[in-house]
Image (cartoon, rainbow, N blue to C red):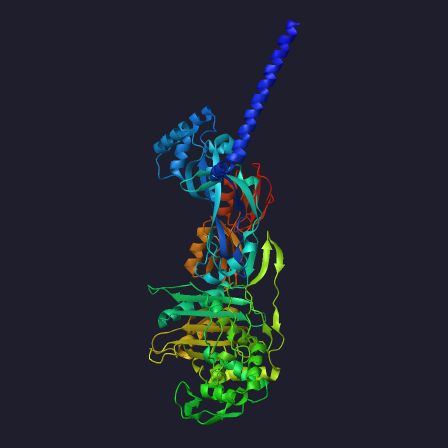
Amino acid sequence: MDRKKELLVRVYLVLAAFIVLTVVIMARVIKVSIIEGDKWRVKGDKNIQLRTLYADRGNIYSEDLNLLSTSLQFFEIRMDLTVAKEDLFRNNVDSLAYYLSATIGKHKTQSEWRSSLLKARRDKKRYFPIAKNVSVEDLSAVAQFPIFNKGKYGGGFIKNKESKRLKPYKSFASRTIGRDRKNVSNVGLEGYFDAQLRGDSVKVLMKNVSPKNNVWLPIYDVEEFSPKHGDDIVTTLNVDIQDVVHNELLKRVVELDADAATAVVMEVKTGAIKAISNFKRSENGTYSEAYNYAVGHTSEPGSTFKLATLLSLLDDGYCDLESTVDLKGGRMKFYDQKMSDSEIHGKGRVTLRHAFESSSNVGMSKLAEDHYNNPEGRKRFVGKLKSFGLVSKTGIEIIGEPKPYIKHPVKTKKEWSLTTIPWMAHGYELTLTPLQILNLYNSVANDGKMMKPYLVSDIINCGDVVKHIEPRVLKRKIAMLSVVQDAQSVLEDVVQSGTGRKLQSEIVTIAGKTGTTRTNYANREEEKEYNASFAGYFPAENPKYSMIVVVYNPRGNAYYGASAAGPAYKIIAERITTLADNLIYADKNQYVANIELPNPSSGYTKDFTKVFEYVGLDYRIRRKKTSWVEVDPLESKMLISKKKISKSKVPNVKGMGARDAIYVLENLGLNVAVDGVGKVVKQTVNAGSKIKGQDITIYLN
């Protein structure tokens, strides 16, 4: 009986202990989670958080698949010194120190690395920094270093992937391509297509390993959380045309010491933008693509807007090209405002054709005054501008395109005056972007069909087209075909006998209109400032491209559209034509037939570049830091691309010379036999086969 009581007492004591312990634990849990919950959560969030891991951003390509923007992958290497077993660490620390000092850690000697690693081991450092900005190529070698080759859990090898956005062509169309930077609003295509380019993201548990520097690393292997790669986008930009526009516009803006300049080339039939360049002068006098004037900057267009006035007068039936108007010698007073032509020429009554080709402000404004400066006529004129697509955005895939500013006689009646119609008629009291003006000229070149300007043709993921973007028609007909044809005729006259005579070329026929805009006319006491422009298309008889060139505030005497913007326009049109006709532009007055390019080949990078440079053959390298490449002819140049060679699979050596092929194959452990001379045309072991030290015969031609 006593024995039974004793057992019961023990059971009760154990039970009581459990109850007390449970109460203490529960009290502690309540205190930590509820009473002190906020305090501990804040501390926990400081060190361990679920943070967003973004996918690799997609690439941006030109129409011929040259990289315009890509993400360069690099890695930060750290080491958990608590992971490796003592024997492994002790036997290999000297070797690891040697490899680090000879490769990614040259800032320390072998002995310094050894001392650092031993100290970090004693201090039980779990995220000891080894190196930053390690390339993908170097990473594979570093992962095979002693101790590191045991991986994260066996050797403490930690890699943290980061990326940096890179533009291989640097300033080419830089503002249009855009930027992708943290804590900054994305612009250009990077901004407009951000959702597609950035891909998916995942939440990963990360630890703050360096609160001082705010360094966060995944607690688990990041490869376990592979977010979907961002989509690639293929633009309509042509690298060769962009090259021409970029360099010629830069030359011109520097020559004129202008504030800024822009140029856009559009394909007439589709609206595809083939090139777009913008330059803005900095305080130190250098020029860069700091702002997209073509898409984002509105200003009074001046005389290039006279095309809209001409179309309106013709389409409404008020005039034909042989209708006459009195130029009043080049000066006329409209109500209380005086208007002058660019010079006091003394001319009287002339045809509408002559008034337009000589860019008479008085002539075009007088005709608009006679037919539109009444209550119904004002509404009709603005209605015509709407039918020409001039009151709406183009819809280009760039964030921030402003809407044209076109006053309405009813909706904005307070802004209207008796002089509004004559001043609008020659491009004042309204503002548009260069691209919006160009779209009107492109429509005339396209027989009246207005296309939507666009910059992206395809969205691609892993080689598959996710979305193909077709050319889009905005307006089937901006005016009657006969009216458009009359406009085409007079735009050709501008270059043949009018203000654009300096643009006549033996290489290509050009049609278009000069524009010279006084920008500070409101203050007559200031030194005059101008914007100079030329908008048009080429070749005139069968238009393929439309183009606008605008130079903002050129200094010196060359401030007219023909003398400031015209020379750049002419050279660009000539050089683009030579590209299309398979010619090489030698200099301003000399063109030579294109040479026959070599057949596709492959081999060592430096061998090809040395030969191409020696014979003067143009080439482009898609990826510069690579040893083995494939070379293909592309239009007037050779395209050099990386040749992938795996350490575990037999490579394709077709197209290589005997020396290169033998070198590659033997270094992969294959036994090589050679039959013939020249380049490899056949190999006995199929490319992609697993390497097992087998024999392989290569046949040369």
Q: Residue at x 48, y 83 (%)?
A: 417
Q: Residue at x 53, y 45 (%)?
A: 53
In the image: residue 625, left or right of residue 228: left
**Nearer to me, 373 or 102:** 373
In the image: residue 17, left or right of residue 141: right
On the image, the x and y values in percent for residue 379 come to 57, 82
From the image, which quarter does the N terminus lie in? top right
Above/below status of 74 relative to 27 = below
Above/below status of 32 relative to 63 = above
On the image, the x and y values in percent for residue 640 come to 49, 55
- Residue 545 in view (yes/no): yes
Q: Residue furthest bottom?
A: 348
**Nearer to me, 548 or 583:** 548
Above/below status of 305 relative to 107 = below
Badge count: 0
- Residue 651 in view (yes/no): no
On the image, the x and y values in percent for residue 557 come to 34, 78
On the image, the x and y values in percent for residue 108 come to 35, 37
Q: Residue at x 49, y 56 (%)?
A: 69
**Nearer to me, 372 or 72:** 372
**Nearer to me, 29 or 446:** 29
